[in-house]
Amino acid sequence: MWERGWTKYALYAWAARLSRRRSRAEAYRLAERLSFWFYLCDSRGRRGVGANLARIHAALGRPLPPSAARRTFANFSRYLVDFFRFSADEFSALEPELGGDSFDVLDELRAAGKGVVLITAHLGNWELGGLALAAAGYPLNVVYLPSGNRRLDEFFAATRQRRGLRTIPLGRAARESLRALRRNECIALLADRDFTAHGATVSLFGAPARLPSGPALLAWQTGAPILPGCALRRADGLGYDMKFFDPIVPAADGAPECLQDPIARRLETMIAADPCQWFVFEDFWRPRAAPARRPRFG
């Protein structure tokens, strides 16, 4: 196990160096070649992506392009290049390529003094969205799932901290997130994958799916609004557009369960914008008796 963990760390460290030492265009080309190898070799991931895309396109009434799964792997490889390439120091080089919504809605929500629960999905470039917010001066706390590999976790934590992000491991997320919200800070959570035994089952693209209950519980306990958003890569393959969706404000007499369906509807909207930028490398809707495993490629 140690050997496998060290090898994975070394692979990511090598990818990080390569992403930063080559031009962005060169790094993209190399990453896409490697993604094709993963696409061919990872049969489980390929089937999972194909099943997810088929369900989404069927729910939307759209034909499924034959190359959609392959494009998802290629998009993920570009996401990794940008994840490794850009930190807070290099944000000025990327900022001109970021468009979309202003941060006015976030300012309005923070004016209530209860903090904001930001939610997104494994979609587009969620890490870049966090970098943009931190660079704009917002106090941003990011909840992450430890991999179980100490060196790898430290590597990713250092990468995020160079972006001005404060990281909170999932095991300590409840207490530290509550404290951050009471300081009127922002908590960022990935709301599409549940890695606990306490998720909520809701309908997503017409079928039952389990989503994390954390965002709803935090909002219910503190009164903080939930602001869904995402950063999607543009068709030009370089720039990104940041998009915020209608906030979800917990009712004073409501229950956390009442927030789960609105969260699911916002996730549907953002994923439907480009399903090939949703990076879930296993069948998302396959029934499970236990929490989902970490995807091998994603």
Image (spheres, rainbow, N blue to C red):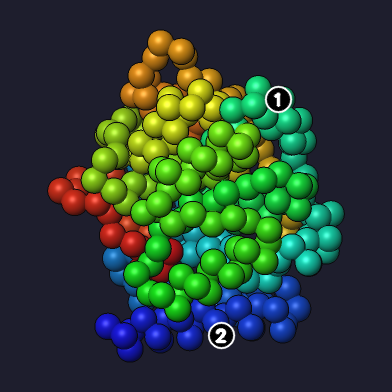
Residue 61 visible at all: no
Residue at image point 58% right, 76% down: 31
Instruction: Write the residue at 78% across / 61% down.
Output: 91
Q: Which of 298 and 206 is in front in this view?
A: 298
Amino acid, disc 1: Ala
Quick check: 159 above or below 278?
below
For label 1, the residue is 111
Residue 38: x and y, percent? 42, 75
In the displayed image of the protein, which residue is found farthest to the bottom? 3
Given residues 202 and 25, the one toward you in this image is: 202
| Secondary structure found at label 1 | loop
Local secondary structure at mark 2: helix
Upstream in sequence: badge 2 or badge 1: 2
Q: Is residue 199 visible?
A: yes
Instruction: Name the image quarter holding the C terminus.
Output: bottom left
Badge 2, how many Cα within 10 Å: few under 14, some, many 20+?
few
Query: Residue 135 at what x, y percent from top left?
Result: 76, 53
- The quadrant of the picture occupied by the N terminus is bottom left
Q: Quadrant of residue 39 in the image?
A: bottom left
